[in-house]
Amino acid sequence: HSPGNFQVYDPVSKILYSGDLGASLGQDYIYVTNFEEHIKYMEGFHKRYMNSGRALRNWAKMVRQLDIETIAPQHGAIFKGKDMVNKFINWVENLETGIDIMDDVYKIPTKRLVV
């Protein structure tokens, strides 16, 4: 979400250090064990800071080519195991975010302001 943000993949340990992607705030655990429950800790951040669903779909397509066993975000809980990694990639791939959810903001106001 910011200039200079990058990700690193280690093919030996099969860990993707994902920077801000996958970041979560407020949980009290290190590893995600219930993905559906964990979404609430990630969703707000991703909808606000990730620029578009298209960018996320391109990311998902790219990382599916890697043999990832762990995704370790810069902030928050870690996704460990192929099942959890795939759940995260699927979630990201289908997330509407950034410019995708701006339609309601860019409309001509229809209500009159009463002073």
Image: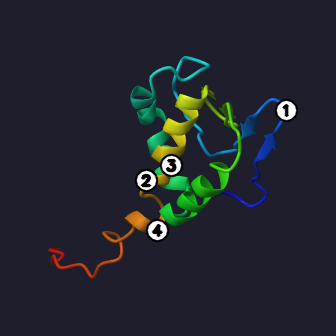
Three-letter code, disc 4 = Ile
Is 14 drawn above or below residue 51 in the view shown?
Answer: above
What residue is disc 2 on? Answer: 94
Expressed as whole percent of the image width and height from the top left, the position of residue 49 reads 55, 54
Whole-number angstrom distance, CA of label 2 to CA of label 3: 5 Å
Q: Tell me the residue that label 1 is attached to.
A: 12
Front tag of 1 and 4: 1
Q: Earlier in the sequence, mark 4 or mark 3?
A: 3
Q: Amino acid at mark 3?
A: Val
Residue that numbered label 4 is attached to:
99
Give me the residue at 69% from left, 37% from top: 68
* Circle 3 crowding by C-alpha within 10 Å: few under 14, some 14–19, many from 20: many
| Mark positioned earlier in the residue sequence (1 or 2) | 1
Query: Horizontal and vertical percent for residue 76?
Result: 61, 30
Residue that label 3 marks? 92
Judged from this view, the residue extending furthest toward the top is 29
